[in-house]
Image (cartoon, helix red, strand yellow):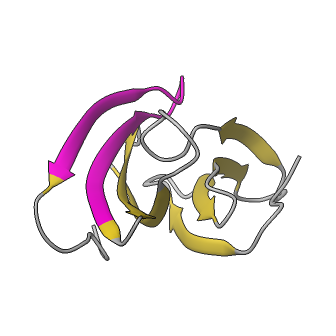
């Protein structure tokens, strides 16, 4: 397992032992910080619902249990943006917040 497309963003976990990436394949991955091996893949994009959203920013919570993902989708000249909150242990989206205007470039 590993990245199959260029990486959009990278963020290290608070303990520094792992890091998360989101790529142009719209898959979030958790990697081992020392060996570089892929530990988990969160398919279904950053908001765990389909392959239409891509993450452009990631941030771990201070305790390392969830990752916030700034997501976007361009469809028919309409931009839909949201923040997805992923449980690191399961990869499930525990919350999704729609953004009315603009996009989330940093978290």
**Given the current orientation, which residue lies at the most extreme front position?**
76
Q: Where's residue 102, x and y in %? A: 18, 74
Image quadrant of residue 87? top left
* Left or right: residue 25 compared with residue 12: right
Vertical position of residue 25 compared to residue 91: above or below: below
Q: Where's residue 44, x and y in %? A: 58, 38
Residue 91 in magenta? yes
Q: For the C terminus, give its image quadrant.
A: bottom left
Residue 32 seen anywhere in this rendered image of the structure: yes
The structure residue drawn at horizontal position 78% and vertical position 68%, both measured from the top left corner, is 5
Image quadrant of residue 8? bottom right
Q: Examine the residues drawn in magenta and state their main secondary structure.
A: strand
Residue 62 seen anywhere in this rendered image of the structure: no
* Left or right: residue 23 compared with residue 92: right
Q: Where's residue 51, x and y in %? A: 58, 45
**Given the current orientation, which residue lies at the most extreme left position?**
100
The structure residue drawn at horizontal position 28% and vertical position 59%, both measured from the top left corner, is 81
The structure residue drawn at horizontal position 48% and vertical position 34%, both measured from the top left corner, is 48
The structure residue drawn at horizontal position 29% and vertical position 59%, both measured from the top left corner, is 80
Q: Where's residue 52, x and y in %? A: 52, 51
* Left or right: residue 76 compared with residue 99: right
Vertical position of residue 64 compared to residue 80: above or below: above
Vertical position of residue 40 compared to residue 75: above or below: above
Q: Depth check: give the residue in front, 44 or 30.
A: 44
Residue 43 in magenta? no
Start and end of the magenta stretch?
Answer: 79-98
Q: Depth check: give the residue in front, 12 or 5.
A: 5
Q: Depth check: give the residue in front, 17 or 7.
A: 7
């Amino acid at each position: 397992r590993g990245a199959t497309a260029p990486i959009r963003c990278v963020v290290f976990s608070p303990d520094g032992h792992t890091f998360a990436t989101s790529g142009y394949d719209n898959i979030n991955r958790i990697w081992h910080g020392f060996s570089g091996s892929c530990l988990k893949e969160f398919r279904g994009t950053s908001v765990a619902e389909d392959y239409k959203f891509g993450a452009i920013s990631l941030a771990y919570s201070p305790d390392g249990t969830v990752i916030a993902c700034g997501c976007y989708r361009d469809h028919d000249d309409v931009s839909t943006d949201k923040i997805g909150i992923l449980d690191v242990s399961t990869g499930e989206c525990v919350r999704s917040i729609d953004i009315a205007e603009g996009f989330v470039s940093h978290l």
